[in-house]
Amino acid sequence: MVIKNVSLDIVCGITSKIPDTGRPEVAFAGKSNVGKSSLINGLMNRKALARTSAQPGKTQTINFYNINEAMYLVDLPGYGYAKVSAAEKEKWGKMIEGYLHESKELRAVFLLVDIRHKPSANDKQMYDWICHNGYEPVIIATKLDKLKRSQVAKSLKEIRTGLGLPKDGKILPFSAETKQGRDEIWALIDELTGLVEPAATED
């Protein structure tokens, strides 16, 4: 997709009603320090629209980014390292679950994991939970530039095994530094949202 304009249109807090945007949505979930804001900024070709933070767990709302007035990238609150109470985490969980159940336009959920590590118990729990809520998450393996090329295949296999992905489950490696994987992610988003531009036909 060619990015012409992007904006943060809607911010949902714990008490907000899930909006009916009328446009296709794809959502991004991941641990608080996995590079979710960097991925979303990379996809939008913006340096700092999605706020990156040195303090994990800063995203405490569901943020809807309008892309070209055609679709939304939806940033879900991070999980794992946020220094908040169990009660607060439970509220976030209910908020995310409410979104997964109530969104009329959600086409896919992307789950981010760090390519350098085997999936944590939190990652596995989130994967199973998204599946339980009716979506088969697409895995994005972040921080690809931090790994030697010779280690990538082994790491991807460990992620597949650790999460219990089906054989046809998708894993897309991505680097926020080099933007490697960006085009592949957009191609899949275009396909999942039905926004693929038709190929030019010869007269």
Image (cartoon, rainbow, N blue to C red):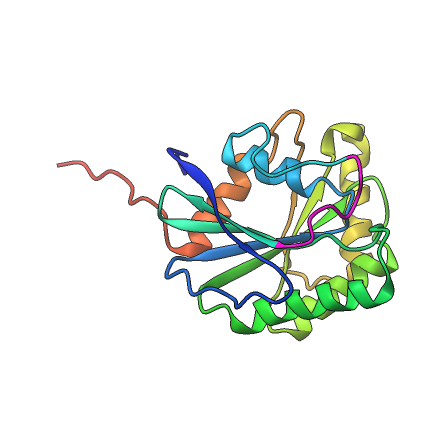
* Residue sitting at x 71%, y 39%: 35
Q: Residue furthest top?
A: 178
Which of 117/126 is in front?
126
Assign the N terminus to one quadrant of the image: top left
The question of residue 7 being in magenta is answered with no
| In the image, residue 145 above or below residue 61 | above
Which of 33/141 is in front?
33
* Residue sitting at x 21%, y 39%: 201
Residue 40 shown left or right of residue 106 in the figure: right
Q: Which image quadrant is residue 129 in?
A: bottom right
* Residue sitting at x 56%, y 35%: 49
* Residue 194 % position (x, y): 38, 55
The question of residue 55 being in magenta is answered with yes
Residue 126 appears in the picture as rendered:
yes
* Residue 9 % position (x, y): 46, 48
| In the image, residue 134 above or below residue 148 | below
Residue 164 appears in the picture as rendered:
no
* Residue sitting at x 42%, y 55%: 193
Write down the region rendered in magenta.
54-61
| In the image, residue 118 above or below residue 173 | below
